[in-house]
Structure formats: structure tokens, C-alpha cells
Amino acid sequence: MFKKQVTQVKKTFDLLTINIDQKETIFALLVSGKLLFLPILYIFLSLFDLRGNSIFHLADLSLDYEKWEHLKNVLVFGKIVPNAGFRALAYFINSISSDLVVKYFIYGFISLALMSLSQALVINYIFKEKSNSPLHFKIASVLLSIFNFYILIYSFKASSDVFGCLGIVLFILAFAYKDDKPFIKNQNLILFILLLTLSLFRNTLFLLLPTIFIIKSYRTTLKGLFIKINLFKFLTITLISCLIIFNIYQSSGYFVSYISQQLDVGVSSAEEYSKYQFDLNSLLMLITLIIKKIIFLLSARESVGLSGNWFIIFIHLDRPSEFAAITNNVFITNILPAFILLSINVLGLASIFTVFSSKFRNGFLYSLIPLIPVLSFAAHHRYFLPYSLFTSAALPFIFDRKSD
């Protein structure tokens, strides 16, 4: 079925003489494909998912993300104010309109634009590395990037994760393009400031930033700011300093939250490890737990990751004694999607680490740093979302051996 779709699209491309290698073309294909596929996915999921508008809903949005009083604590060390930039955006959007449908449209537009831009940048780079690959592999890459249902959902969902996706993409491509001529003046400086800004929208990005100075050109750029300081350099240093301070305060709250939640859903919450046993049996159990966390990371929906139960039907509401059903078919909503996502991500990772350049692989490896704490947390596929943009786009090329 998928092969027939690829063949049909290839004939259309040949007829219209579309240059699929251009970022603009890729972006347009992604946006149009998602808009066409979303209604189908929405209708299908509504048959089994018992939560209304679950594709678009973000639980935190209705709780505290839109409240200004939480943002007042952003410069209080240790206060939990994660993703302050996204909270400010949520407050601003809510001030424009409190109507839920209007907000869904605004968030949907933002998410569609950012996710499609991130994917277009990824696919464009992959096509440059695989410039000699046959057209049908490139078409398959675009189609898989559209039909990955998890990416599609977050292309319309109100979430800070879409900002995290763009940040991870820019970080990895900084390594991938490190030997190329800069596209614009002060490119490294602009990208570093952009990553600092995106870290305010997705706080885990801040963990990555020190590693970007592995790239020599970024170290040179930073040192250059402190040589013969002029007004531009002074203002730039001031801006970077302010962004770093905001991120440090934000990260302190994230650290406090992370430590407290370890008692509920982390490795330390497991009775086997709370006793500090270091025998072989405990070591094997710890390895097993980490493997399970990795599988959850690559495939599990959030409710499965939080509960550790693949067959979960009910979730807790705000009150501990209250429950709500989230599915009427665990195979369709929990098991089958996990199998599909696990297959895509495993094959996609194999493609990245076997048929692509070392600089691309190294950037991808460094970008995995924010996932390390997740292995001792409630791992689920949302944390892997930025990397699924790469695995989906790269997967078809594992079967293309002629262009190697």
C-alpha cells in the first residue's frame, strides 16, 4: 500500500516537475499533507479515544499555564516555573481570547508552522547527504514524515514540545553544517541566542547548550565578543547574560521538581532500589528497568509511560478518588501505535548510525543528553518527539545501498 502511494506520488512529481530537494517545497508538502491527513486521524481516534478533542488538548493549559501569577516566580531560585516562555505565550493567547476553539486555532497554526519548519530543515539536510538517492526514497521520507501520527498530532497540539523540536533540530544541524560556509552573517551568534530563547519555551534544551562549544567556530565566536568590545558586542553580551540567568533560574525549579517526582515515578520509587542492594539480582533488575524505560521512550503514549501499564484504561483525575476512562480498545490506542512507533524509531536510528555522516551522527548523539534524566523518570514517547523527526525522515535510506 505504502509502495503504491510512493509510486503514484513519484509520477505526479515527474508530471509537475517539482523539485523535492528545496526547503520551500518540502515545507509546502508537509503542511498540505498534514492538513489532508489530520481529519482522517481525528475521526479514527475519536472512535476509540474517550477524551474529547484529545489531539488538541494540553492538560497543563487549563491548570496553570495561562496564569500570570506563576510567571512572577520565574526569578525565584528553586521555584517550579518550567517553560516560562511558553507560559508567557499561553497567557498572551488567553488574553486575546478565552474561547477554546479560537485558542485551538492559534496553537494549531503555531505548532503546524514550527513542526513543519523543523521537519523541512531535517529532510532538506538528509536529502543533501543523500543527493544521489533515487527519487522514490526521498518521496518515502516525506510521506513517512507526514504519516507519522505522533508527529502529526503534535503538529496541531498546544504544547511546548514543538519549540523543543525546533531547538533540537537547530542543535543537531549546527554539528551537521559545522564545516560549511555560514548562510548568513553572525550565524553562530544568532543560532546560540535562538537556542537560549527556545530554552525558555522548553527548559530541557538548556542542558544541551554547553556541548555546542565542542564546535570550534562557536568557541571562536564567543571569545570574539570580548575582544575590542563595541556597542553591538556590549548589547549582545547583555542579552546573552540575561537569557542565561533566566534559564538558570528556570532550570533550578525544574531540578527541584525532578527530584521530588523521583519518589513517585522514578527509579528510586521502586522498592528494589530503595533498599540500596547492590547484588547481581538488583543489577539485573536495574538493567531490565532501564530497557523498559527505553522502550517506553521510543513508543509509549504518555498514560502508559506514567503508569508503566500497557493496558491502562482509566487515569486519575484531579482528585485521587476520581477516575476517567481514556480508551475503549487498548490494542488500537496503546499496543498497535507503540509497535508502529517502535518499528519506525528503531529502523530510523539504525539508518542514522549506519548510512549517514559522522558529523550528523555526532550531533544526534550529543542531542540525546536531555534524555538521560528521563531514564530515571516516567519515560514516554513525548520526550523522544524531536528525535522522531529524524528517525522518520532517515528510515527509508537504510534500504538505499546503491548511493553509499
Image (cartoon, helix red, strand yellow):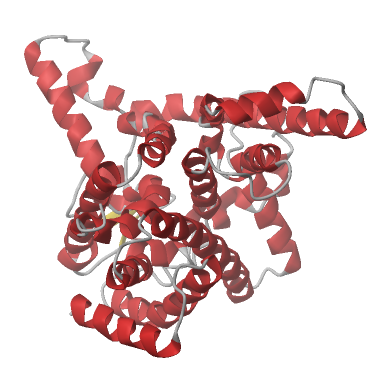
Q: Could one spot residue 168 in this view of the protein?
A: yes
* For residue 284, side relative to residue 130 (left or right): left
Choose top left, top right, bottom left or bottom right for residue 133: bottom left
Q: 60 or 399: nearer the eye?
A: 399
Q: How many marks?
A: 0
Query: Residue 34: x and y, percent?
Result: 43, 75
Q: Please determine whether, in this image, residue 211 is positioned above or below residue 34.
A: above
Query: Residue 128: x and y, percent?
Result: 43, 57
Query: Residue 351: x and y, percent?
Result: 25, 49
Choose top left, top right, bottom left or bottom right for residue 258: top left
Query: Residue 57: x and y, percent?
Result: 48, 64
Looking at the image, which residue is at 33% across and 72% down? 139
Q: Please determine whether, in this image, residue 130 is positioned above or below residue 247.
A: below
Q: Could one spot residue 76 in this view of the protein?
A: no
Q: 181 or 267: nearer the eye?
A: 181
Quadrant including the N terminus? bottom left
Looking at the image, which residue is at 21% across and 58% down? 402
* For residue 103, side relative to residue 274 (left or right): right
* For residue 184, side relative to residue 310 (left or right): right
Looking at the image, which residue is at 64% across and 50% down? 183
Looking at the image, which residue is at 18% across and 34% down? 291
